[in-house]
Structure formats: structure tokens, C-alpha cells
Amino acid sequence: MYSFKKFNEMKPLVEKLAKVCEAVGYIDPELYDKYEVRRGLRYKSGRGVLTGLTEIGEVKSYTIDDGEMIPCEGKLYYHGVDLEQLVEGFTKDNRFGFEETAYILIFGQQPTREELAEFTALLTEYRALPTNFVRDIILKAPSGDMMNALARSVLTLYSYDESADDTSIANVLRQCLELIAVFPMLSVYGYQACNHYLKGESLYIHTPPENLSIAETILYMLRPDRQYTELEAKLLDICLVIHAEHGGGNNSTFTTHVVSSSGTDTYSVMAASLGSLKGPKHGGANKKVVEMFNDIKAHVEDWEDEEKLTAYLKRIINKEVFDKSGLIYGIGHAVYSISDPRAKIIKSFAKPLAEEKGRMDEYRLYEKVEQIAPTLLSKRNRAASANVDFYSGFVYDMLGLPLELYTPIFAIARIAGWSAHRIEELVNAGKIIRPAYKNVAKHVKYIPIEER
């Protein structure tokens, strides 16, 4: 076992060497401009550098008029289908929508009732982990970080797959559908193991019945009494739908393309994408929103007092309070400016849940911050609005979901998009994705070790 005593003995040396790494690793920011390097693969305007083509997801946030970018109301399309119309369609029919969304993303077509039933039955059939996997893999080595636990489980499933390295489309499709089906179990069981073995809480391992949607399955496995309301399940389902895809340029989906282009197996690809999504700059933002609002609620006595609320938000921006990052989490987006369609959707459904839970005072607080924050951030010379993370964290909190599962639930949704993009990369297999990096270090003469 790893020795922390040994680590503590070596810590001074490691810290000394770390300072050397920091010094030698520093690159003059002016060099990025000199060589026209698009940091983050983005132009200074915020527009992304075109690195690929896709038919799966489209993000629309501006129009072009005489070569000028004009911000517009945000739109998101799944294989050409307007996300807002998709949500309106299945909610009007009082149906769950994530399974239909996954079908559209992977197959590029809107399924008939028969096709959707067949696809849902296939996912249900795949909703079974290998014999003793929960006991031998998940329960025997619980992790305090659910994303790491999820990635480890995904990599371990490689060992149970007799065709793990087969990258034919039929085999990859089978692997992707199996992972979509078991991601909820890997995530929730990983959390239950952590909650029991690391926190001393009771252990609950519920095997979900076959007739449940993926959203219902999550709530059934998570809650000790297995109970949930229809509104709770439908709202979680909508959260899965709006997180399922966001074009090829987001960090984790781009990772899916990059790693798939190397020709490696599906399990390695999905583990890499999970590692990307885990990053707080990508998938962990809704946790920060909830933590920020907990801080606001603790320090602003009267939530209806707009003047005091504004004053505290200014202190957050000035890096005086909360995590001193200067960020109002959930406000602003790298692509959207005027509006994020996902935020509009989830906000419209958050209100009924807040009413059901008796938390309308908090809902109004969120609305006030949503109104005040963009004005305070206007000095950045770019329109800012609530993004998907702003209300999703509040919804997860009302659903009683633990903070540890916020990002895994994002992954449960986004693996549908990752699967579609992995298949698209393989169908259009070209060169391995290998961007250029310019070396700016000076050449030096090798010095014999005795002369250094």
C-alpha cells in the first residue's frame, strides 16, 4: 500500500522540484500572439477554430452579417432537430425523452413508436452488469470521487468483453449501447459504496425493474425507499436530454474524437472523455452554482432585498468572498451570449418542482441573481446570460441528488452524444488528430555531468 509517511518525508524535495517545473514550464504570453496561436482553439472573439465536421449536434449563437458576428438567441439542434421542439414534443405526449434523444443522436433519425420501443427494450436488455461486478469491483475498492470510480469501472469492463478491441461499427455500437445502459448503475452503485464504506451510512444496492426509464432507474437505485414522484422523474429525464449533446467542440466530445482517431477501444475512449468531463471548467460547474448559492443564502439575510443581494454579488466579483475566483457561476458561456436554450428549458420546469417542494423562495432568489448578475458582468463587453448549470444544480438539489453525483449524471446523459461522435469518427476514419505545437525553447549545448 502507498505510504503517506514516505510521501511526507519526500515532500520538501518534491516541492523544490515543483518550483523548477513551474519556472521552466512558463511561456511568455506574448509568444502566443507572435505566432498566432489560438489558445483553447478559440479566436479572440470567442469563436472556435474549425477542426472538424459533424452532423450530430449544432450550437447556434450568432448570425453573420457582412462578415460581422451578430449575437442571437441561442439554439441547439440534435441531428437537425431543435432541442426546444424535441422537449415540447415528448412532454406534450407525457413521455420520457432521453431514450428517444439517444436514438436521434446515434441513428440520425426520429424513431417511430415501434422503433423507439424496440430500442428501449434493447437498452433494458443491456442493463445488466457482469456477474459479481458490483461486489468485486465497485464495493471492494470504493472511491471518494465518483468520476474516478466511474472511469475505473468503464476500464474494468474491457476485461469482460471478448471483443473489446474490435472497432467495427456493429461492435462499437453494441459497446456504446451497453455503456449507455449501465452508466446509471455504475454511477449510483459507486456512490452507494462511497457513502457506506467511507462515510459510514447504510448501504443500498437496489436492482431496478425492467420497465423503468433511465431517469426513473437513477432515482429508484439512489433512494433508500425507491420512491419518487412522476414530476421528479420527468424533470430528471429533461436534465438528461438537455445534457446529452452539445456539438463536437466541447472538451469531452473533442476528446472522444481525438482518442477515437487513434484507433483505440471504446472503453479507453469513454474513460478519457470522463476524465475531461470531470474537470471543473467543464462538467463540475453546477456543483459550484449550488455551493455559491449556499454561500449567498448564508450571508444575505433578506433574499428579497435587491440592494443587499447586489452588494454581495459585487463582492463575489471582486474576489472578496465565496471562493474568491471572481466568478458568478452559472452566468455566461463560451458560446452562448444572449441566451442558452438549455437554461430556458430547465428553468421552465424548475418552477413546478420548486412549488411541489415548497422552495419558491429559493427559486425567486435564483431569478433575482439571474437578473442582476449580467449587468454587473457587462464590463466584459460581452453579453452574459444564465447557462445550463445555473438552474440544473438547483434542480438536482431539489431532487435530493448528492453533490457527488452531479457530474456523473452529466456523464450518464453525455455518453449518448459521445457514442454518436465516436461512431461518426470511425465511419469517417482519416488521419489521427495531431495538432501542431511550436517549440520556443532555445537550443543549448549538452554539458558533461561533471562540469555542471
Image (cartoon, helix red, strand yellow):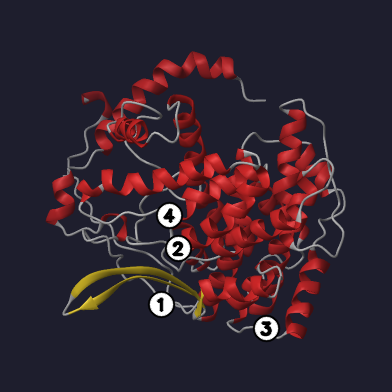
Q: Secondary structure at mark 3?
A: loop
| Disc 2 to disc 3, C-alpha distance | 27 Å
Mark nearer the viewer, 3 or 4: 4
Pointer 1 or 2: first along the chain: 1
- Residue 154 percent across, percent down from the top left: 67, 53
Q: Residue at x 69, y 60 (%)?
A: 234
| Residue underneath mark 1 | 53
Location of residue 409 with respect to 16 vertically, above or below? below
| Residue underneath mark 4 | 387
Mark nearer the viewer, 2 or 4: 4
| Residue underneath mark 3 | 111
Give the residue type that dot 1 points to.
Answer: Leu
| Disc 1 to disc 2, C-alpha distance | 11 Å
| Residue underneath mark 2 | 254
Between 284 and 39, the residue placed more toward the observer is: 284
Q: Is residue 138 left or right of residue 367?
A: right
Q: Residue at x 61, y 47 (%)?
A: 354
